[in-house]
Amino acid sequence: MPPAPPPPVKTPLPSGAIIAVLLVNAAEAVNINILFPFMAWMVEDLGYGGKRLGIYTGCLAASFCAAQFLTSVCWGQLSDKFGRKPTLVFGTLGTAFGTLVFGFSTSYTQAVLGRVMSGLLSGNLGILKSYLTEITDDTNRSDGFSILQIAGSIGNILGPLIGGMLSNPTRNFPRVFPPTCIFADFPYLLPCLLAVANNVLAALMCALCMSETRKWPSSSTKPSSTAVAASTMKEKVAQPLQVQNKGGESAAAQFVILGDEEAEDDDDDEMGDVRMVRSTHGLLRERADCSRTTKIKGDDEDRAEEEDGEEKEEEEEECTGSTDNETHSDTDTTHSPSRTSSSDDVEKGQQQDDHTPPPTSSSSSSASSSASSNASSSSSSSSSSSILSDRVVLLAVSNYGLLAFSYIILDETLPLYMKSQVAEGGFGFASHEIGALLSLSGGVMLIFNTILLPIIAKQSKLWLFKVTNLFAIPLVMLWPSVGAFNKLLVDKYGYAQNSRTLWICLLTTSTIKNVLATLTFTAIIITINHSVMDESLGKVNGVGQSMASLARAIGPALGGVLWSLSVHVNCSYINFVCVAVLLVICQFINYQLPISLDVKKNSLCHTQ
């Protein structure tokens, strides 16, 4: 029995690119999470409190993702066309600009406008997933996506911490920020300024440390004979040409076009020397100078493709028979000093009479390149359009969007729930307490993502999704249960409103929720990337991010409406029940995905 093959050696992750990915994703997480601790107070300061608070906070939270939904696919396609690096740099700076507008808001409309600008100008999340898939392989992809989650955890720590602790600094830190400073007029500007600085740093590191990974098809440029010989490793031999000698007899001849590359670059009219080797009754050689002028006409794609196909078939026949006997025979190699034999472009001709000039090297090469380019672009377009009709891709992307929809409703509900009073089933937290709780649970997640996530993420992604999502469903209902338990402790047993027991319960629940969410999102993101080939990663991640953005646009608004309904009917369970039902649907969809998605599809179409 032969010994088992050794396990594959793990490919090291590129350090510079990973640093850039970490910073960009952390900046994105900060931008999303920075407003949650103070959003409810900000909306109240802008004049929309009371029973309308849930609706207006939901709309403000939804504006960022609603705008991102409109442009996510476009950003994915732009990254496929222009590369991952420039689109990430531009998107990071665009988000910074929108965040700055949001920080200077003096009205609800301006606040929504700032969040919309941030969403429109950024498609970073989808592009990051494409980039990370391209710089990793099967041996280190789990580690790479673990780092992506680590970056998200860092942002989940810094965002709420910055937003909760530094909002309204003139009230919270009057000795450091006197009432006469700019932050008295713009109480939520300081955390936004730190987020802007973080984005600028991420964009700078992205520009310096990130290498471009997008591979483009070979361009249809004019190839020199040296490049053609190096790339194709074969000569193109001309077809016999019927010419007349001095005696009027017709004889078969071989022609070779010796093109002048400089003349091709400068003028549309091209001149070439034609060397014809003629044979009658034996091996006769004669060199004839033929002057010809050609004008390259407009691209005729159908004709170019037919000529290209005929040339390839005839080339295979002649390269085996004619090349050695005719072109490599002992011929006269004397030619014009301005041309060298190493730069000769050897072209095929078709049988013509002496009145019809043969096709030039540049025109034939142009036609062939044009046909090849058209075929490549046609294939790429067909591949892109087929993605949206693939059942497996649609299921995976839809599951991602529905999962994002579930968790954004939960994330929108939790600050409102923690802000509500104990008598209403909440905890009566202030903004800095909400920020502290979210940051502490994020700190625990940083440890988890660094140590345990790379190990757990190596499991089957479909199995990982099933298990973690199954535990997440009952966990969602723990939040209102903890609220009811806290109310019991305060009302019946006289515990303090923010007792140590309450903080332990909330921190544990929040940490477990984050662990399960991280594992579930990691599994579905890798599943989506495994559903397509490399050349479609940008588009499929753009579609996935667009679905998630749509979900995150509808989710906060719906969560706000449901919360207003909960306050009206005095029942805090409504939002949590809705989230649990959505997670059950996600579980059902995951069972429809094939087990083959645990393995990355290999690209079937690499550029030559």
Image (cartoon, helix red, strand yellow):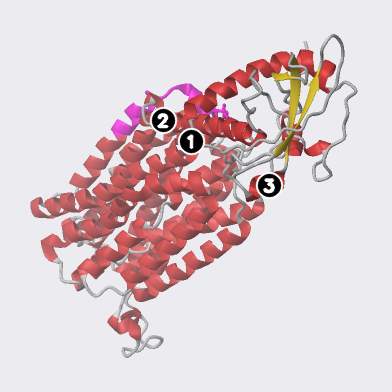
Quadrant, the C terminus = top right
Disc 2 to disc 1: CB gap under 8 Å: yes
Q: Which residue position holds label 3?
A: 263
Sequence-first disc among 1 and 3: 3
Res. 452 in view? no
Helix, strand or loop status at disc 3: helix
* Residue at the far front in the pictured view: 247
Q: Is residue 287 above or below residue 404?
A: above
| Residue 251: x %, y % from top left | 75, 14
Residue drawn 20% across the image and 55% down it = 425
- Near-viewer residue (256 or 376): 256
Q: Which residue position holds label 1?
A: 536
- Near-viewer residue (197 or 271): 271
* Residue at the far right in the pictured view: 330
Q: For residue 207, which numbered disc appears in the image? A: none
Apparent side of residue 125 relative to residue 69 in the rendered image (left or right): right
Sequence-first disc among 2 and 1: 2
Image: magenta residue range: 584-608
Helix, strand or loop status at disc 2: helix
Q: For residue 387, which numbered disc appears in the image? A: 2
Apparent side of residue 351 relative to residue 587 in the rendered image (left or right): right
Neighbour tally class for label 2: few under 14, some 14-19, many 20 plus, Cα within 10 Å: some
| Amino acid residing under circle 3 | Ala
Q: In whole angstroms, how far apart are the C-alphas of marks 2 and 3?
A: 45 Å
| Amino acid residing under circle 1 | Ser
Residue drawn 54% across the image and 35% down it = 534
Please say whether residue 199 is one of the residues in the magenta stretch: no
| Residue 188: x %, y % from top left | 32, 74
Res. 455 in view? yes
Please say whether residue 598 is one of the residues in the magenta stretch: yes
